[in-house]
Image: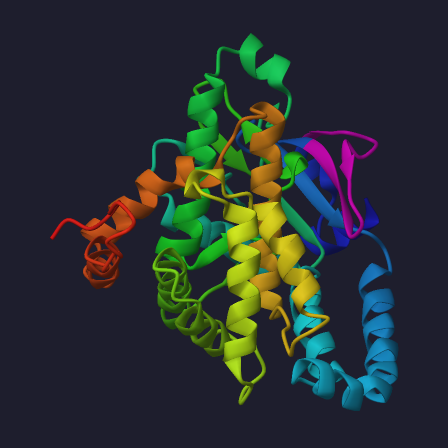
Amino acid sequence: YRIMEDSLGRNLSEVFSELTPLPVAAASLGQVYKGTLRSTGECVAVKVQRPGVAKMIRRDVYLLRQISKVFNDVAVKRMGVDAVTLLDEFAENLLEELDYRQEARNIQDFQRNFLNDPLVKIPEVYPELSGDRVLVMEWIDGVRCTDLQQLQDIGVPVQEFIRVGVQSGMRQLLEFGLFHGDPHPGNVFALRDGRIAYVDFGSVAEISQTNKEAILDAVVEAMDQNFVQMAKYMSKLGFIAEGSDVRPIANAIEAMWEDAVGRDMQDFNFRTVTTQFSQLAYRYPIRVPERFALVIRTLLTQEGICLSLDPDFKLLAVAYPYVAQRLLRDPLYCDRLRQVLLKPVPEVRKPVFDFR
């Protein structure tokens, strides 16, 4: 309570008519109390940073940074980047999570992005009541996204909820370039009206327009089975050390892709691909930049949630309609669609996308 009062600059009873005496939820960096605003009667979540956690994390990052210098030469040889840079990428996102004012801004950005989306709920935030270590936002009264029984009890169609979740995730990555970096089941809820609701916006990352286009280009090249060109786009994104010969890497990616995807793209399993790709990092100068590590974690978490609701879930099968829509409607992407639709197909194989 002392941290709350220090942040608000007044007695808690002046702001809240009710406030739980103990946290209703907790995480590594903070804990959440449930309260009622005295001025409006609105139910709110009050997120409070654990005492001393910021100082502890900054100390540990400093110590790790000193230690990582010892491994710089090895890291450059193995991955084409020094160990200090790798640590700095990780630390940047972690330190941003300590700033609750930044999280409030993240929430406002998400509100603007999903303003006209009737299927996504982003909680209201109260910047005037928030500070570096305290965040006050709307209380979300929903059902945990992986609780299949409760979803059915409140009448939420499971397959439609899965579709809404996948589409909202694709919009974050391909449309907004701003995505929730930690969408685990405790941060994603289903509302009674079928909407999906997100909470905890401390871990948020951005992808530039250039990187969004490079990601799509890499996917298009994979669909074209042009793995050399795909590897070149991966190098552009920072996955492959600059100056590396991409041909042996492309051959390894092709073998991995064929093993993971098989004969039907709809059988694509993201976890299988990422597991096999991580093994390539031990043989080639490959690394996963921090921003894309969050993308991968986000997609893996989303796939896991959907599989818990539907064991037969196929990520590409559900995501494809939205991705195709983006390719058709967005002038920036329509050339990529033409490349997929008009790709040359050998005579011995029946054309699938060749409409010429």
x and y percentages locating residue 237 in the rendered image: 49, 73
x and y percentages locating residue 100 in the rendered image: 64, 57
Location of residue 259 with respect to 123 vertically, above or below: below
Q: Quadrant of residue 263?
A: top left
Residue under the point 81% across and 44% down: 1
Location of residue 41 with respect to 47 vertically, above or below: above
Q: Is residue 256 visible?
A: yes
Q: How is the image coloured?
A: rainbow
x and y percentages locating residue 325 in the rendered image: 25, 45
Judge left or right: residue 288 versus residue 51: left
Residue range highlighted in magenta: 17-34
Q: Looking at the image, which is closer to me, 131 or 256?
A: 256
Q: Residue 54 magenta-drawn?
A: no
Q: Looking at the image, which is closer to me, 10 or 59?
A: 59
Q: Quadrant of residue 138?
A: top right
Q: Looking at the image, which is closer to me, 239 or 111?
A: 239
Q: Residue 28 magenta-drawn?
A: yes
Residue under the point 69% across and 69% down: 90
Judge left or right: residue 32 versus residue 162: right
Q: Is residue 101 visible?
A: no
Q: Residue furthest left?
A: 356
Judge left or right: residue 260 versus residue 34: left
Residue under the point 70% across and 44% down: 47
